[in-house]
Amino acid sequence: MALHLLWDEFRSSFVKNLEALPVSQFNEAWKTSKNRTRLYEHTILEPVCREIGLNYKKELFKIDYTFCRKSKNGTDVPLVFIESENVALDAEHEMRKLCCLSAPLKVLITCAEWSDIPGDWKNGGYKELLTNR
């Protein structure tokens, strides 16, 4: 499968599953890091994996989530590696892990006070800082 098609399918399904969440469930997930991880793991990523026709694996090669396709001999071949880090400023380790692996698609999921527009966040945003990193 071509990378751009895999990315398009992943992104479309990911957005669809996020948009399908009731606001109350989304708000509950953002109360704690553990809640967010549970949301990604069970409510978002498992359905995304099924929808794009791959097999879901957790902690394969110490990667948080892996989507695989079975080869003709039954071996799971990783096509998507996903790392999730609740603290965006600490995500560099996850980025290095993703860069060390070979797969058509690698995704980092994190959250941060992103916008750099003055007044959007009490302490300012992290968009420029994290983009440069």
Image (cartoon, rainbow, N blue to C red):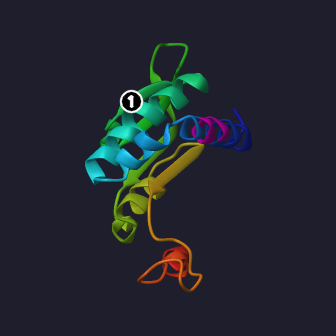
Where on the picture, by quarter, is residue 92?
Answer: bottom left
Asked if residue 64 is positioned above or below residue 116 in the image, the reply reads: above
Q: Residue at x 54, y 75 (%)?
A: 127
Q: Provide residue 34's location: percent of width, then percent of height.
A: 26, 47
Q: Quadrant of the N terminus?
A: top right
- Left or right, 55 with respect to 30, comes to right
Q: Residue at x 41, y 40 (%)?
A: 25
Q: Which residues are magenta?
A: 12-16
Vertical side of 132 occupied by 63: above or below: above
> Which residue is most to the bottom?
118
Q: Secondary structure at mark 1?
A: strand
* Closer to us: 48 or 30: 30
Asked if the stretch drawn in magenta spans residue 133, the answer is: no
Taking 94 as reference, is 114 left or right? right
Q: Which residue is mark 1?
A: 57
Total numbered badges shown on the rendered structure = 1
